[in-house]
Amino acid sequence: MRRRPRFTILCGSLVALLIGSATTAFAGEKFVTHDDLTQRELTNWTHRHQDEGYRLVRVDSDRTPEGTRYSATFRKHGDRPDWPLRAAVDARISHELASTGVPGIAVAVIQGGTLRYLRGFGHADVDDDVWMDGTIVGPYNSVSKAIAGALTFDVAEADGLDLDASTRTYLPELPAQHTHTVGQLLDLRGCVGHYEQIPAATFDEGPYASARQAVAEFAHAPLVCEPGRHWYYSTHSYAILGAVLESRLGEPIGAIVDKWITRGYRLPSVRPIDLADTSVRRMTLYSGSNTELRPSDSTYKVLGGGLEGSVLDMARFGQRVIGSDVLGRASLERMLTPPDALSPYAYGWATGTERGHRFADKDGSWPGSRTYLRIYPDDGLVVAVLTNRERGAHSAVRLGGDIGALVLGD
């Protein structure tokens, strides 16, 4: 049975034993202490308490017949542990985990520009007993499309990309049937086929070094409808969008993401999925029966579903968007406004109003994970959810919406 943490208010003399000196600054602070931890337990608790808003201030080790054991002390750092809604959000996520059997869930909440909540529940890897946490990396799936929306409008603002121009203005090598505009690729009025018409097996030459290479695999496929007159969901539409950005900026999509998103938006964990890079601390993906899945190549769909990152950076991205750190107000409003009545889907985001609150969101689903990002641009609220199973009764969308309503008091 796992030991429960001991929450204590420490006097100055005991603080001296823990961190080497007794000072007025430390007296009366709240601490969490764990004893007799294995290396794995120490790592798990470190990530857990850092998510909750505690800082590791001391670790001691002791050799025992069972191996090295550790004692660790964490000190409260900032206001996150005192957020009034913490217990209610904990309870809602715990219910989702227990009632659906999903291996792990990670959630981040940013309100008013401040990180209010960050926590993992369950396991990032069951067999290795790695707890889920807020900074472990997982696939963003189609939440990548929302990031693509911000990126595209950012390039339009900064570099003159014309969303109303014909796609073939930037990609003249495309066959003549590609009569869509750049904006229609993003708002899904471009009628490019989805997996029903262009299955994942089409992309059997991966990993792809550029979006243009991936687009060459399906560019000959006919459109499924007349651009501008119908809405049709398509991941491959975003592959073409990536090729447009490559043409405009003169770099492959991986370099564009690194320059504009990872470094430009200050989201260090966000990157195109590179399965060859084993240095990334990733969650394990699971099937509906909770058996491990081997992830497949996603380099053909970087902007449509091929980005990865932490739930923390997903929420930070949402905050960068509504906080006008990425786009000017006019571009933000256009990005979140559907161009017509065909669909509430705007430019990378679905949009709507719930209980009088305007929101924009994007969900993602692919073998091994479900994801969700929800922003309330008028309320300064962002909710992000990562899970490491696709099929089953759990719902990242339902969970994210419930947490948003809870925070807004609805």
Image (cartoon, rainbow, N blue to C red):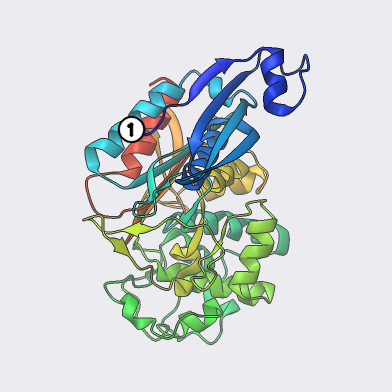
Residue pictured at 35% horizontal, 62% vertical: 233
**Residue extending farthest front:** 65
* Image coords of residue 354 (percent x, y): 37, 31
Q: Secondary structure at mark 1?
A: helix
Left/right of residue 155 with respect to residue 300 in the rendered view: right
Is residue 377 at least partly visible in the picture? Answer: no
- Work out whether 126 lies above or below 81: below
Name the image quarter holding residue 8. top right
Name the image quarter holding residue 127. bottom left
Residue pictured at 34% horizontal, 51% vertical: 126
* Image coords of residue 265 (percent x, y): 66, 52
Left/right of residue 82 with respect to residue 355 in the rendered view: right
Is residue 141 at least partly visible in the picture? Answer: yes
* Image coords of residue 225 (percent x, y): 32, 71
Question: Toward the viewer: 41 or 308?
Answer: 41
How many residues crowd mark 1 within 10 Å: few (<14), some (14–19), many (20+)? some
- Work out whether 300 lies above or below 162: below
Q: Quadrant of the C terminus?
A: top left
Q: Quadrant of the N terminus?
A: top left
Amino acid carrying label 1: it is Ser
Question: Toward the viewer: 383 or 322?
Answer: 383
Number of disc labels: 1
* Image coords of residue 327 (percent x, y): 65, 48
Question: Toward the viewer: 377 or 164?
Answer: 377
Residue pointed to by mark 1: 94
Name the image quarter holding residue 14. top right
